[in-house]
Amino acid sequence: MIVLVTSIIVVAFAAVCWILSMRPIDRISLVIRFATKLGLHNIFSRPELYQATISNGYRVLLSGRLASYVLEEALNFKMRPDDVIVATYTKSGTTWMQEIVWLVCNDADIKTAKATGLLDRYGFLEVPHAMPAFGKGFQALEQWPTDKRRFIKTHLPFQLLPYELQTQGRGKMICVARNPKDNCVSFYHFHRMNKVLPDPGSWSDFLSKFCSGELMLGSWFDYVHKYWQVYQNRKDSMYFVSYESLKRDLKKEIENLAKFLERDLTHEQIDAIAKHCSFSSMSKNQATNYSSVARSGVMNFQTSKFMRKGEVGDWKNHFTINQNDAFDRMYRERTKDWTLEFEFELGNDTAKK
Ligand code: A3P
């Protein structure tokens, strides 16, 4: 009896020491994994946003109380020289670009792309590993085999990227930005169907929050403009493209990306990537359409699909005339010093499906 009690105490003590010796991000992963096993992961649903101040002084709105621990780790994340990073404000065409970039870097290997979900081909920088339905997270990126190129997705503002990325252009970074009206509409529907985001409230409430930068990770304006400014002096290691340009001429953009990523692709390979990455193809493809996440219960496709419409100009179905006038005034004011311009609609003759 004494031996049994002593053994239990020793094991419990060792377990507590082990847990205390972990980095906060690893502790979070452990808790998430445990909660998921017990079927308690819904406790992470519909979190409140809160303002966090990260150790470098950057203030940011985060969803979920634990997220700031992950961002602290992300700041010190070690880059590798051949890393490929897709960085976007949420809902601006991340998934689309991820698929294109992966295929460009892998000789248009569509067979493997179809057989392996995008969530398994990329690591999500600001997400702890084992978060249900997010695929590979931070720790998986750290443990990525050194003989395999890492593909990294992030929605972090530039100021929260790993220090090595902020200070030097390590690896290759691709940024996609989308006109803010369509970006806001897509984000609204994403909030409606995604249980790990706060409830969006009404469209008009959501639009006001988008305009005042009160959504997760903050202002679209600050986010996009910062990346654009950095890009001006880093064109060898950074590529910046708009969602609208991808939509206007996908093949041309794939060619440009191949040049940037120093990949020699044939015309046939470029054609195959463009065909595979069309909206109609990607929305049917289980490796890219997030249907696995819907099955896990985190996203509710009955409310809205992940691959929703994939259009330029859907904002016209959401903005009232007054909302649009107010948005245009605010947009003109906030972007008056920018050299970056967006298209809010594409002529039918130029928009290629
Ligand atoms: P909509 O909600 O307007 O349809 P992200 O990947 O950053 O979350 O962005 C998602 C948005 O990109 C969604 O916009 C989605 O439909 C759109 N999208 C994804 N793949 C696309 C593709 N191949 N062509 C056009 N749009 C695409």
Image: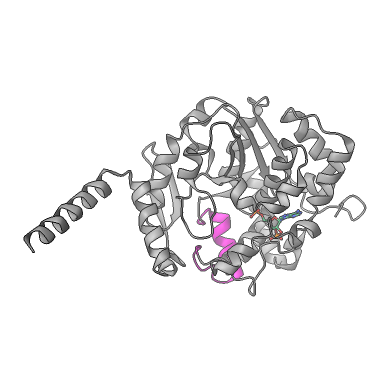
154 relative position to 14: left or right: right
The residue that appears at 63% across and 73% down in the rendered structure is 303
Specify the farthest residue to the right.
349
Left or right of 191, for residue 254? right
* Quadrant housing residue 231: top right
**Residue 69 showing in the rendered view:** yes
Q: Residue at x 61, y 69 (%)?
A: 203
Point out residue 218 in the picture as x, y percentages from the top left corner: 51, 50
Pick the front one: 30 or 347? 30
Name the residue nearer the viewer: 51 or 209: 51
- Span of residues in magenta: 196-215
Left or right, 252 with reference to 196: right
Taking the image as drawn, is residue 337 in sight? no
- The percent position of residue 64, horizontal first and vertical second, equals 41, 58
Magenta run includes residue 200: yes
Image coords of residue 52 (percent x, y):
38, 49
> Which scheme is used to colour this image of the protein?
one colour
| Image quadrant in which the N terminus is located | bottom left
Percent x, y for residue 151?
60, 40
Which residue sits at x=76%, y=49%?
111
Number of labels in the image equals: 0
The quadrant where ligand 1 appears is bottom right
Q: Residue furthest left?
A: 2
- When the figure is inspected, residue 79 is found, relative to residue 218, above or below; the finding is above
Residue 206: in magenta span = yes
